[in-house]
Image: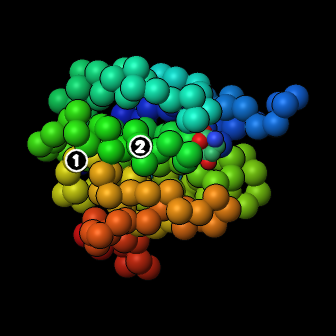
Amino acid sequence: MMKKVLLLTTGGTIAARNGEQGLVPDIKCQDILEMLPEIKGCFEVDSQDILNLDSSNVQPEEWQYIAEIVTENLALYDGIIITHGTDTMAYTASALSYMLQNLDKPVILTGAQIPIEKMFTDAKRNLQAAFAAVNTDIKGVAIAFDDKIINGCRAVKVRTLGFNAFESISAPYVGEVYADGMHV
Ligand code: GLU
């Protein structure tokens, strides 16, 4: 049976388009799903645009808002995927890890170094890893980035340009994508 996933967008580079003053989050969850036809065939996806922020403007109020939406919806889905800017994604992941303890399902944050509509984007691969994580028995809050799944309270952004933007500090990866699929 196809797993049921809720995709929530909050802004960030992944959803950005060129605006007058640089990149601005603008791309909606429906557009993101349109760009992932392989996901549409494998998962039943509902989606919601819940915020539209550069993540440097994400504050504890937003963590609380995201936590509330996850809490209200998690029972209805096999997992929740949240797109988020990379600059504060590790902080949001950490905060959610402590706010939402003992989850029995995955809540996966992801984003991108390059917007999803650009040629060399890493957005699709990162989203694919996030969806793949929902197909495993990974539980709790984690970040999917550069083919790795990192525990939400272990992740740190260590690179601003490299696709391997996040590291897992003093803990192994929760999962990693190989040619034969996700290794947990
Ligand atoms: N400052 C932006 C943000 O964190 C851009 C960085 C990104 O998303 O990669 O939302």
Q: Is residue 31 left or right of residue 148?
A: right
- Figure quadrant, ligand 1: top right
Q: Does the rendering let one see residue 58?
A: yes
Quarter-wise, where is residue 179 in the image?
Answer: bottom left
From the viewer's perspective, is 98 left or right of 104? right
Q: Which is more N-terminal, label 1 or label 2?
A: 2
In terms of secondary structure, where does tag 1 sit? Answer: strand
User: Which residue appears farthest toward the right when viewing the image?
Assistant: 20
Which residue is label 1 attached to?
A: 140
* Total marks in image: 2
Q: Residue at x 44, y 57 (%)?
A: 156
Judging depth in this view, the residue of 42 and 62 nearest the camera is 62
Q: Position of residue 153 (x, y in %)?
A: 30, 51
Picture quadrant where residue 163 is located:
bottom right
The spot of residue 58 in percent (x, y) is 50, 29
User: Label 2 vs label 1: CA separation?
Assistant: 15 Å
For badge 1, the amino acid type reads Gly
| Residue 21 vertical position relative to residue 86 in the rendered view, above or below | above
Please name the residue that numbered disc 2 is placed on: 91
Which residue: 30% across, 37% down? 96
Residue shown at the point (20%, 51%) measured from the top left: 139
Tell me where residue 118 appears, x and y as whole percent.
75, 51
Rendered position, 69 above or below 173: above
Q: Residue at point 30% right, 27% down? A: 67
The crowd level at tag 1 (other Cα within 10 Å; few <14, some 14-19, many 20+) is some
Query: For the residues carrying marks 2 and 1, which lies nearer the camera in this image?
Result: 2
As shown in the figure, which amino acid type bears the numbered disc 2?
A: Tyr
* Closer to the camera in the image, 66 or 182: 66
